[in-house]
Amino acid sequence: MAKGKPVEAEVSARRAKLIRLRREGVRYDDPRILNLGYSDSGAARKDVIRALERNRAEEAAEVGVYRQQENERLDTLLEAVWNKATTPSPVFDREHEIVSHEIDLKAVDTVLKLMDRRAKLNGLDMPVRAELSGPDGGPMQLGPVSETELELLMSLGRSAAQRQGDAEEEADGDADEG
């Protein structure tokens, strides 16, 4: 149902006052909120939720536009280097004779970086899962710990994840060589 611009402006002004009062810690059943024109505290609560949802929808729309724009830019860049990365070009010797055909490894690296950026932008990569375990792989027993002890435990978890990542890269390198 279409409301007129004056009504929308009135609702927007009322919501702004309501949110300002809520930020100050004023309860929904306070007369200052009810005097804004709400029939009861439940109506005021619903209006705050509507305002938050509207803001969230506007933010999501802006993020969608940004993501689309960035994807289009990545498409343009990818198109510019794709052939160099996928089509072998002749390699000449000093006498200008063709000695082989090779792809441009710098272009391949650029394509991979563009693809990585696209994956991050669109949330395509699976998050890395790290898990701390106790003795014999069982659950880790924690009691009260200091901030220093907690930071140490977290760094141990990062170190284990890094070691596993290094081992996987090394295994990939061995597979490439074989």
Image: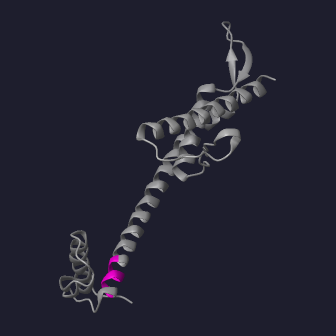
From the viewer's perspective, is residue 107 above or below residue 17? above
Residue found 36% across the figure and 82% down from its top? 46
Q: Is residue 45 magenta?
A: yes
Q: Which residues are magenta?
A: 43-48
On screen, 63 above or below 121?
below
- Main structural element of the magenta stretch: helix, strand or loop? helix
Q: Is residue 22 left or right of residue 149?
A: left
Residue with the most extreme front position = 143
- Label total for image: 0
Q: Nearer the viewer, residue 88 or 175?
A: 175
Q: Is residue 48 above or below residue 128?
A: below
Residue 173, horizontal then vertical, whole percent: 72, 26
Quarter of the figure with the N terminus: bottom left
* Residue 26 visible, this orientation: yes
Q: Nearer the viewer, residue 152 or 81?
A: 152
Residue furthest to the right = 178
Q: Position of residue 123 (x, y in %)?
A: 56, 52
